[in-house]
Amino acid sequence: MKFKINDKVLVTAGKDKGKSGVIKKVYPKLNKILVEGANKYTKHIKPVSGRVGDKIKSERPFHTASIAIINDKGVADRVGFKIAKDGTKSRFFKKTGKVITEVALSKK
């Protein structure tokens, strides 16, 4: 998959077109990603036997065709892959040609 957690992306289609955010979760089998602060929906919870009703806002996943990664210059870009002579695979920005640095994830 071309997108990874903590990549900064721009929404290119849908109701949140133009918003940018960080990828929180990746679903490679569904080819979808979850962007922080975008594609929010409201779920209404009915009051049941003493529990109060509520409205819960949550994010839903985007299809990867609806987003574009933001490069080091702050412009929407595409992702390519390079395979080095030692066999390591790295991602790079198609417009600038720079390698995308991997951000270390904090383990919970």
Image (tube, rainbow, N blue to C red):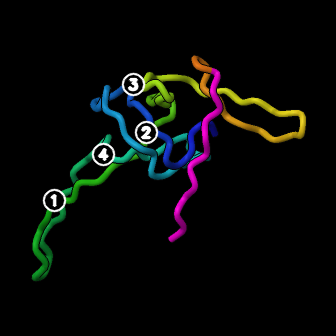
> Which residue occupies the extreme top position in the image?
95
Q: Residue at x 29, y 54 (%)?
A: 58
Is residue 44 left or right of 4 when viewed as pictured? left
Mark 1 or mark 3, which is nearer the start of the sequence? 3
Is residue 71 left or right of 83 when viewed as pictured? left
Q: Residues within 10 Å of mark 3 (few under 14, many from 20)?
A: some
Q: Is residue 102 magenta?
A: yes
Q: Residue at x 21, y 51 (%)?
A: 42
Mark 3 or mark 4, which is nearer the start of the sequence? 3
Query: What element does badge 2 sit on?
Result: strand
The residue that mark 1 highlights is 55
User: What separation in Å lies between label 3 and label 1 (alpha carbons)?
Assistant: 28 Å
Q: Toward which corner of the image does residue 30 lie, by quadrant?
A: top right
User: What separation in Å lies between label 4 and label 3 (alpha carbons)?
Assistant: 15 Å
Q: Which residues are magenta?
A: 97-108
**Amino acid on which disc 2 is placed:** Phe
Query: What element does badge 1 sit on?
Result: strand
User: What separation in Å lies between label 2 and label 4 (alpha carbons)?
Assistant: 12 Å
Q: Residue at x 40, y 30 (%)?
A: 10
